[in-house]
Image (tube, coloured by chain):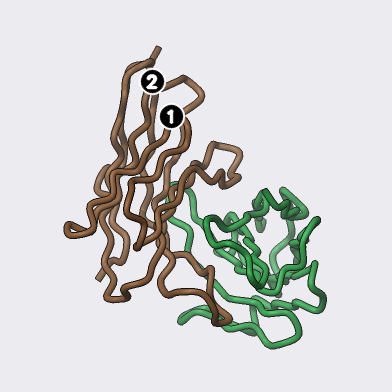
């Protein structure tokens, strides 16, 4: 079974509007972390936002917020006031397990969503 | 955030030759490095986990004799694609972490686009 699922291969949004990118996850581990990364055409992975499984509040970083619904196992990314420079591939990723262990930090990625912002 | 430098950013090699990709942590000691592979418009797939001073742990289906990983120091891990073939053409990207690091992000290199002709 897929551990991270992004069901939107592509999304379009008008400049200055908000957009939500979907992400659902599957894990039996009570301790996990959820990440969102932006990957422009250059290929670099740009960290956007992080949500820990025990965090009580939804994470926010500037124009990015994470709508964390633990019972539904979803971690959707909301980008407010979209900009042309937001056009890129977006990945949701999960780290399973708590601190410690030699593989701590290993991420499992979703399939990605290509976001296109129209002027 | 911490800086991870990956080199080269692009490489073209002939079929049958070997290519070495370097991943360096510039301002921290990377106790663990991860190597991912990404085909165009697809997800990142973990190839192996590299811990300083010990053998790498490869994911299922990854040929350890083909993708040699060396993590000899706390700031450098290398991935060598041996006897490269056109099907090895892909985007390879590393990430690094250090012991005790607050795990709110993983630090990625810039990636290496490998083309085997």
At horizontal 54% and vertical 82% (from top left) the residue drawn is A101
Q: Where is mark 2, residue-wise? A: A81
Q: If the image is split into quadrants, where does the C terminus of chain B sit?
A: bottom right
Outermost bottom residue: B54
At horizontal 72% and vertical 68% (from top left) the residue drawn is B30
Residue A24 figure quarter: bottom left
Q: Is residue A88 left or right of residue A65?
A: right
Query: CB atoms at circles 2 and 1 under 8 Å apart?
Result: yes
Instruction: Please indicate, yes or no, whether residue B12 appears anywhere in the rendered image.
Output: no
Return the chain for callout 2.
A
Q: Position of residue A96 (x, y in %)?
A: 40, 71
| Above-or-below relation of A99 to A49 | below
Q: Secondary structure at mark 1?
A: loop
Instruction: Please indicate, yes or no, whether residue A108 appears anywhere in the rendered image.
Output: yes
Q: Where is mark 1, residue-wise? A: A63
Q: Position of residue A117 (x, y in %)?
A: 39, 22
Sooner in the amino-acid sequence: mark 2 or mark 1: 1
Q: Is residue B98 left or right of residue A30?
A: right
Judging from the image, what is the letter of the chain drawn in green?
Answer: B
């Amino acid at each position: 079974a897929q551990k991270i699922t992004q069901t939107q291969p592509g999304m379009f949004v008008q400049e200055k509007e908000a957009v939500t990118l979907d992400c659902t996850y599957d894990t039996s581990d009570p301790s996990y972390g959820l990440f969102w990364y932006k990957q422009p055409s250059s290929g670099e992975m740009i960290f956007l936002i992080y949500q820990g499984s025990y965090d009580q509040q939804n994470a926010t970083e500037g124009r990015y917020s994470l709508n964390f619904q633990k019972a539904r196992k979803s971690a959707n990314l909301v980008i407010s006031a979209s900009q042309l420079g937001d056009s890129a591939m977006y990945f949701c990723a999960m780290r399973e397990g708590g601190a410690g262990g030699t593989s701590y930090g290993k991420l499992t990625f979703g399939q990605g969503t290509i976001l296109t912002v129209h002027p | 955030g911490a800086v991870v430098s990956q080199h080269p950013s692009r490489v073209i090699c002939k079929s049958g030759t070997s290519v070495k990709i370097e991943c360096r942590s510039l301002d921290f000691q990377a106790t663990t490095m991860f190597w991912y592979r990404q085909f165009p418009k697809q997800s990142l797939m973990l190839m192996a986990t590299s811990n300083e001073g010990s053998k790498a742990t490869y994911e299922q289906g990854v040929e350890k004799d083909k993708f040699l990983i060396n993590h000899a120091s706390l700031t450098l891990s290398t991935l060598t694609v041996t006897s490269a073939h056109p099907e090895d053409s892909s985007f390879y990207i590393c990430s690094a972490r250090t012991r005790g690091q607050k795990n709110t992000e993983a630090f990625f290199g810039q990636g290496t686009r490998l083309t085997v002709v």
